[in-house]
Amino acid sequence: MRETFVNFFKERGHAYISSASLIPENDPTVLFTTAGMHPLVPYLLGEKHPAGKRLVDFQKCVRTGDIDEVGDASHLTFFEMLGNWSLGDYFKEESIDFSYTLLTQVLGIKPDQLSVTAFAGDADAPRDEETANLWKSHGLRDDQIYFYGKADNWWGPAGMTGPCGPDTEIFFDDGRPKCGPDCGPSCHCGKFTEIWNNVFMQYNKNADGSFSPLQQKNVDTGMGLERILRILNGKETVYDTPLFAPIISKIEELTGKKYGENVDDTRAFRIICDHMRAATFMLGDGVVPAKVGQGYILRRLIRRSSRYMSKLGYEEPFMQKISEVIVANYSKAYPELESNKDFIYTNISNEELKFHKAVMKGLRRFDQMVAENGDNPVLNGETVFRLFDTYGFPVEMTIELAAEKGLKVDMNDFNSRFKTHQDTSRADSNQTFKGGLADHSEETTKLHTATHLLNAALRRFVSPDIMQKGSNITAERLRFDFNLDRKVTPEELKQIEEFVNECIKAEIPVVCEEMPYEEARDKGVIGVFTNKYGERVKVYTIGDVSAEMCGGPHVKNTSELQGFKILKEESSAAGIRRIKAVVGKFD
């Protein structure tokens, strides 16, 4: 399916670009890459892409807002998004033609099985009759075309302002009768499954809330690989597709249980499949388990996998065995998994062991809780939640242990605290682009360049083996994560700060060049070199100080930074250090 999609668009003038990392480049507003368009935001905003105006890819994505819903028929944390883009080239007519042709002539979906949506219009933009008429030109009937408002058929902007526009969503109709007179693609009865979304970016939302036409009109489309495979294979759920079959087989082999035999076990199988797949890919991109941010999500996925494997009656170490299956099955599409497999296996096994130790600590803490509870027959929700949040101790286990001692758990209180925790987690992981790659303000542009100078200084004064492990830039400051198993000394921090300031005073030009990936690699350019063979990349060079592949905005000359000051150096995770710094005039 990946090859079919890519080849279809390559034959129509699109350049293939490889998947970006799950760690967003210089974007402080989301924990992970959440969609195929995420790495392309600068180019949707008008920057020239080195590969041209027509692009196609399959992108690994993670969305963490619904972790607790994983286990049903459709929710996933990790998924793949097939996408094609027009950056100021073709627009609605060609986009709809491409989609219709691929779905019906290549994938064999019958025209009668399709339903589509279009924007109904409002005070900001007119009803999208053009899109409806284009679908009709391909033979779709009026009763296959639905109009909805902004909530369903409008994308963006990425932040408070920026590119946005109407979209047309394409749905598979499974043929069952409608559930009622209002049944349509926006209904959740299961009759309609969204398979593709074509966004027509033709407006800019201004600071005053008004909309004006864009000079560069873009097309941004996304098709979920798991969903289209479910439909093409005639399966009930995404977990029944070939993507999950090898993982399910390994779990069956380890546990002696059969997938699908009962509801509880089926849910456990699905959670382990999803979470282990997501964890393996996160580790493959350099995320390590930690107490906050991306590392916290990774830790949570690993620990939930362990809990649900226990529910299937398996208590031995298992994670590396399942990760090996995932690496073997995905490495052709994502070679970084094979090249980073030792790192993946070491970290996932270590975290699994830590969780088992944490459970033992949790058991001891539980005994203390019971003693402190005295004659009260109910354990309060705050104490139980603290056990869950601090030790990762499963609340189900707490309930079982409490029952053995004749105690109950105040689940209303626990659930209230858990919901607050869950809402906060969702808010953190579902933020939109209020900065980062979508932010080309003067301050963030300076900080992007300062990050390159900081990276060069770290490699010069601390270790030549230092590599970027994360970057978070807002208009106020930069945050740079890098590999190092010790503190950066005060003397080194002083050297780094002085060096960057010397580069600023030297007024060094910042030069952007486009070159083949292989040429950049052979020149010793800094960057994440994975499977970009044959692609053209942007390289920003700052004299003989720095040369890095990058998609972010940069100043023309280092003098624009005015000055550089390190605010803090601290630990981010095991083997990862973090520096926060600012630019500007300093007395």
Image (tube, rainbow, N blue to C red):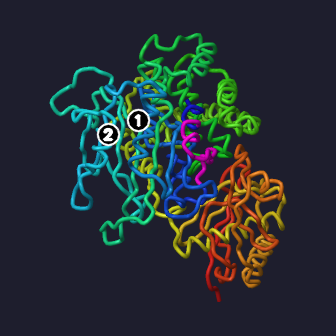
Q: Quadrant of the N terminus?
A: top right
Magenta region includes residue 10: yes
Task: Determine contact: label 1, label 2, CB under 8 Å.
Answer: yes
Residue 62, x across and y down, in percent: 53, 42
Residue at the spot 45% in from the left edge and 30% down from the top edge: 227
> Which region is colored magenta?
7-24
Residue at the spot 47% in from the left edge and 18% down from the top edge: 266
* Near-viewer residue (36 or 337): 36
Which badge, 1 or 2, is on the more N-terminal residue? 1
Label 2: few (<14), some or many (≥20) within 10 Å?
many
Residue marked by disc 1: 100
Instruction: Give me the disc on residue 135.
Output: 2
Mark 1 is on which residue type? Tyr
Q: Quadrant of the C terminus?
A: bottom right
Which residue occupies the extreme left position in the image? 181
Residue 550, x across and y down, in percent: 66, 60
Question: In the figure, 3 relative to 205: above or below?
Answer: above
Residue at the spot 43% in from the left edge and 46% down from the top edge: 94
Q: Secondary structure at mark 2?
A: helix
